[in-house]
Image (cartoon, coloured by chain):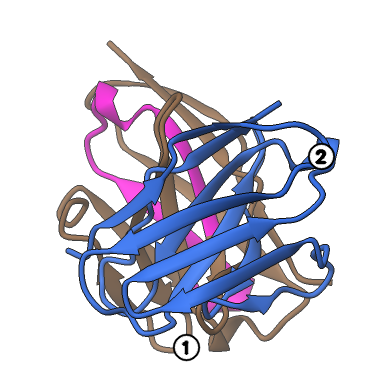
Chain colours: A blue, B brown
């Protein structure tokens, strides 16, 4: 299985900050990577697909980049509603594994 | 509007069987894969597998193969996830989601399963 290593696991930030979350794949996954946001008790929400395509309705403060084995999710000007857990997922090879998550806290 | 609506929470005993469901609406159900994701209490997301409603083709995560069965009923636009014999370790919230390109774009609200002895 392809392993996805997210870092950091926990991130403490303030409203207005810019943060970057990294996802490293154990092998080349081209741009077959998605980023999700999950809040407690809720379903995940797709933010970014194909490594860098912002989903309709998602704030432009979110951006994704990378290809191959290194990917980043950047959130500019953190808002209170952005504090959540973020996951990456690879979709090139079954099983479509997730990273372990990054818990973004105030 | 695309919606995936999942069945209600379940409380079961070990050894019992169960089927939970995920009803799609607002789109052509036949033409998008439906995936299933497990989230154990306080833990991350685990991809269980997916099914293509058009031909009921499946792709299981080997970690879950043999433990669960995925199925669809095109007539009711419903995907289902079934267990033959539940274990306490099956206690989790289960999500269904629609695959669109390189991502799962619409998700059900989740079904919480509690299994106890």
Q: Is residue B77 magenta?
A: yes
Give the label on residue A81, or none. Answer: 2
For label 1, the residue is: B54
Q: Quadrant of residue A1?
A: bottom left
At mark 1, the secondary structure is loop
Q: Mark 1 falls within which chain?
A: B
**Residues packed near mark 1 inside 10 Å, few (<14), some (14 to 19) or many (20 plus):** some
Q: Give the residues in magenta.
A: B73-96
Residue at image position (58%, 52%) is A20
Say whether residue B46 is visible.
Answer: no
Name the spot of residue B69 as percent of width and height, x first: 29, 58
Residue at image position (46%, 58%) is A88
Q: Is residue A88 magenta?
A: no
Q: Are marks 2 and 1 on the same chain?
A: no
Q: Quadrant of residue B77?
A: bottom right
Q: Are marks 2 and 1 in contact (CB under 8 Å)?
A: no
**Front residue of this view, candidates B28 and A42:** A42
In the shown orientation, is residue A49 left or right of residue B71? right
The answer to whether B51 is drawn above or below residue B45 in the figure is below
In the shown orientation, is residue B52 left or right of residue B90? right
**Front residue of this view, candidates B50 and B55:** B50
Name the spot of residue B115 as percent of width and height, x first: 36, 21
**Front residue of this view, candidates A106 and B51:** A106
The answer to whether A33 is drawn above or below residue A83 in the figure is below
The answer to whether A33 is drawn above or below residue B14 in the figure is below
């Amino acid at each position: 299985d392809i392993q996805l290593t997210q870092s950091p696991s926990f991130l403490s930030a303030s409203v207005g900050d810019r943060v970057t979350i990294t996802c490293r794949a154990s092998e080349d996954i081209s741009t077959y990577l998605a980023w999700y946001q999950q809040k407690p008790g809720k379903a995940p929400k797709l933010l970014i697909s194909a490594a860098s395509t912002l989903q309709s309705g998602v704030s432009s403060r979110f951006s994704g980049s990378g290809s191959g084995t290194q990917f980043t999710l950047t959130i500019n000007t953190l808002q209170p509603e952005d504090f959540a857990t973020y996951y990456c997922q690879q979709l090139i090879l079954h099983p479509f594994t997730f990273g372990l998550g990054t818990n973004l806290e105030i | 509007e695309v919606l995936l609506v999942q069945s209600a929470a379940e409380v079961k005993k070990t050894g019992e069987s169960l089927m939970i469901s995920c009803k799609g609406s607002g789109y052509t159900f036949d033409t998008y894969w439906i995936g299933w994701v497990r989230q154990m209490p306080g833990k991350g997301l685990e991809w269980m597998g997916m099914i293509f409603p058009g031909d009921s083709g499946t792709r299981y995560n080997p970690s879950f193969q043999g433990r669960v069965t995925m199925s669809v009923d095109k007539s009711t636009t419903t995907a289902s996830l079934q267990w033959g014999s539940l274990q306490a370790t099956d206690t989790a919230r289960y999500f269904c989601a629609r695959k669109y390109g390189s991502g799962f774009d619409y998700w059900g609200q989740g079904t919480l399963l509690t299994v106890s002895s």
